[in-house]
Structure formats: structure tokens, C-alpha cells
Image (cartoon, rainbow, N blue to C red):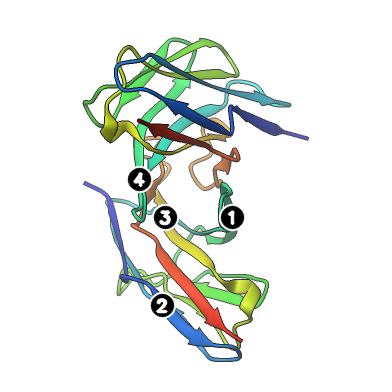
Amino acid sequence: GDSVTQMEGPVTLSEEAFLTINCTYTATGYPSLFWYVQYPGEGLQLLLKATKADDKGSNKGFEATYRKETTSFHLEKGSVQVSDSAVYFCALSPGAYSSASKIIFGSGTRLSIRP
Amino acid sequence: SQTIHQWPATLVQPVGSPLSLECTVEGTSNPNLYWYRQAAGRGLQLLFYSVGIGQISSEVPQNLSASRPQDRQFILSSKKLLLSDSGFYLCAWRPPDRENTEAFFGQGTRLTVV
């Protein structure tokens, strides 16, 4: 079945460091891919998304490119801030021709940024 | 605009007691609805999803059940809570037949079973 695998956390970085959080997926057809962020005690917020191969999603300095050849959607940011400390989830939605309507999440990566 | 409401925000319940968590969506029709659970320090587990009134798909057999009595209302229930039911429960919605659209989440309910 469809699945998402993302790097284990926690990830601890210093402010202004470069961030990469790896995400790979398994899916039949052509899924849409998402990154969500969860701040402490809150629900999930969409960070960015990509709906087809080679699309790049971007928001708040974060970027991720939909790579069909490597089935990956890695999250990157050039210079992290303390306010980026949160849990990040990679997710997929099966393609339009799939009968499933569910969204499948990875296990989440906790990111902590030191001042 | 669309909004999602989930309550209560926090709940402490004894083992063996019943549970009812409610989620409602405003500003849209026939949404896809989802219940997820996040155990402490762990990822999101899809519990149930629904594509219409009375249509419930269960992802994980367990001590919980879900119902959709109205188009924009989704209820998570249990007859007898277990300690292992503790966690952060999240409701979400998505427009119907729009698989490339993101889901929108409520603020969550933190359930502690004691």
C-alpha cells in the first residue's frame, strides 16, 4: 500500500544553519505530496505542497521538489530560525484515479533550533 | 470561508468510561472527514475517514468507532476507554473529489486516560 517514510528525529540545529528533512514515498499512480508543520499543542498547518512531478512547493523560505524518479520530497531551508522549531510531517494523497480518499502521513520529524 | 471546530480541547477520563469527541465543519458541503491520533512522541495514525453521511472507513481495528450523523459532523466514540487510548486526536476535512488538495485540521483534543 501507499506509505511515507521520513527521517527520524529529533533534529537539532543552530540558528541560520541549513536544513534538510528527507522524505520518500511509495504510491501507485500519481500522488500529491505535502509538508505540514505542527507547533506545540496545536493542530497541523499546511507548509507547502506539490501536485505533479518536478513541481516545487515553497513557503516561508522552505522548499521541496517532487522527484518522481527518486520518489522523494525532501524539505529544505537555507537559514533556519528559532521560530522554525516544530514537528514537520510529510504526507501524500493518492492520485486522482485511486479510490482512496485518505491522506497518509509520515512519522514526523521534531526540529529544534538553538539561538 | 471554511472553518473546522473540534472539542473539547482537553479531556481527562478514567479507564472504562465512555468517550465522545465532536468535530464540525462550516462553510462547505459534503467534505471528506478524517480522524487521526497522535500518540506521545509518535506520528499521525489515520483512524477513520468518511466521504459522506453514514459512510465510515476504519483504518485500524481498535476500541474506537466513528459516526457521521450529519453532512458536516464527525464524531469519535468509545464505549470503554483504555489507557492506550491516550493521545492527541485531530479532526480534518478536505473538499470532495479533490485528491490534490490539502486537508485542513482542527486544533486537536488532548485525551488522557487515567
Identify the residue under disc 2. Answer: A11
Q: Amino acid at mark 4?
A: Ala
Q: Amino acid at mark 2?
A: Val
Identify the residue under disc 3. Answer: A91
Q: Chain of mark 3?
A: A
Identify the residue under disc 1. Answer: A46
Q: Amino acid at mark 3?
A: Ala
Q: Amino acid at mark 1?
A: Leu
Q: Secondary structure at mark 2?
A: strand
Mark 3 is surrounded, within 10 Å at the Cα level, by few (under 14), some (14 to 19) or many (20 or more) other residues, namely: many
Inter-mark Cα distance, 2 to 4: 19 Å
> At x 36% / y 15%, what residue is drawn?
B17
> At x 54% / y 30%, what residue is drawn?
B96
Q: Is residue A102 above or below residue A108?
A: above
Quarter of the image with the N terminus of chain B is: top right
Q: Chain of mark 4?
A: B
Among all residues in the image, which is located at the extreme right?
B1
Q: Secondary structure at mark 3?
A: strand
Q: Position of residue B91 (x, y in %)?
A: 51, 33
Inter-mark Cα distance, 2 to 1: 20 Å
